[in-house]
Amino acid sequence: MKQFISVKDVSNVNDLVHKALAYKQQPYSDKTLGANMRIGLLFLNPSLRTRLSTQIAAQNLGMEPIVFNVDKEGWALEFNEQAIMNGTTVEHIKDAAPVLGHYFDILCIRTFPGLVNSSEDYSEKIIHQFIKYTGIPVVSLESATLHPLQSLTDIITITETIATQKILKKPKVVLTWAPHIKSIPQCVANSFSEWVNAWGEADFVITHPEGYELDEKFTQGATITHNQNDALMGADFVYVKNWSAYHDYGKVLSTDASWMLNNEKLAITHQAKVMHCLPVRRNVELSSEVLDSAYSIVTKQASNRVWAAQAVLSEILKGLK
Ligand code: CP
């Protein structure tokens, strides 16, 4: 594997999932694979799970991780090719990225969308400039439109739960929009849709209020409905997530509390396991009664972030040998 930006960088989703589950059983089975190699984790935005799980994964493979909070500690970066830098930015990506390419063997980057200009965000300008100018493998820790390490984790968690719960039929997986007070990126929803479709082993339904249609290039293959109750009927997994509007870009069009998953709605499902990438706003996005119930697998999901990252880093390290 040369980079990890989306599911398109993965030749076989199931192979990667099973590699991750094998690391879960034996975390140190490749403890020298990354010996004498350094991995940079650059954050242009906050993180708890991605930051810590990727560091642990790198250490399990013998790598030295170095975290750099660019947004708080670094020079303000410029990404416009022909910029006349007489404003607030101090260092051009063309100058900074090659330096990082010399310090590290693998570079991981988290960046968020501005949620103002959809073509700028959906061009993935920032992560593509890091790829272009570092000259080393780049791993997305979440970009403007996608969160592939989260989505790999989600497929790992569904696969693991299918085995432990002995679900014999093709599972029904529902992605449901949930209310939120802020404008939230579409990354997790886009990425989950893209990965479930590429995986191809679920009946996949997406439900959201009118106006919250995602970019079709990610959702093609899914059944899409505005009727949440219809969607939830018989579901084995319910993935709860807010996202802001894609077409009316970045707008919060609804905060309708009736879309929040509670016990009454969960009763429509087939005793569904409930997923969320975290962080979650309790009793806004997802009810405490569900989060605190045995149906919630959000902690297992978050803990699986380590094994997803370890499987990806291991594939990239093997490509460097
Ligand atoms: N799910 C996720 O990416 O969590 P963090 O933002 O805490 O990394």
Image (tube, rainbow, N blue to C red):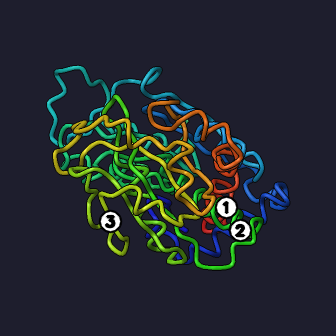
| Residue drawn at (55%, 68%) of the image | 1
Query: Of helix, strand and loop, which one carries label 3?
Result: strand
Dividing the picture into quadrants, the one containing residue 103 is: top right
The residue beneath circle 1 is 311
Residue density around tag 3, few if under 14, some if 14–19, many if 20 or more, within 10 Å: some
Residue density around tag 1, few if under 14, some if 14–19, many if 20 or more, within 10 Å: many
Query: Mark 2 or mark 3, which has the lower sequence index?
Result: 2
Nearer to me, 70 or 24? 24
On-image quarter of the C terminus: bottom right
- Quadrant of the picture in which ligand 1 is shown: top right
Residue 30 picture location, percent across and down: 80, 60
| Residue drawn at (55%, 39%) of the image | 278
Residue density around tag 2, few if under 14, some if 14–19, many if 20 or more, within 10 Å: some
Residue 5 picture location, percent across and down: 44, 58
Nearer to me, 5 or 40? 5
Residue 196 picture location, percent across and down: 48, 68
The amino acid pointed to by label 3 is Ile
- Left of 117 or right of it: where is 31? right
The residue beneath circle 2 is 19
Q: CA distance from mark 1 to mark 2?
A: 6 Å
Q: Is 159 located above or below residue 73 in the figure?
A: below
Query: Of helix, strand and loop, which one carries label 1?
Result: helix
Query: Mark 1 or mark 2, which has the lower sequence index?
Result: 2
Query: Mark 3 or mark 1, which has the lower sequence index?
Result: 3
| Residue drawn at (38%, 48%) of the image | 177
The residue beneath circle 3 is 224
The amino acid pointed to by label 2 is Lys
- Left of 62 or right of it: where is 167? left
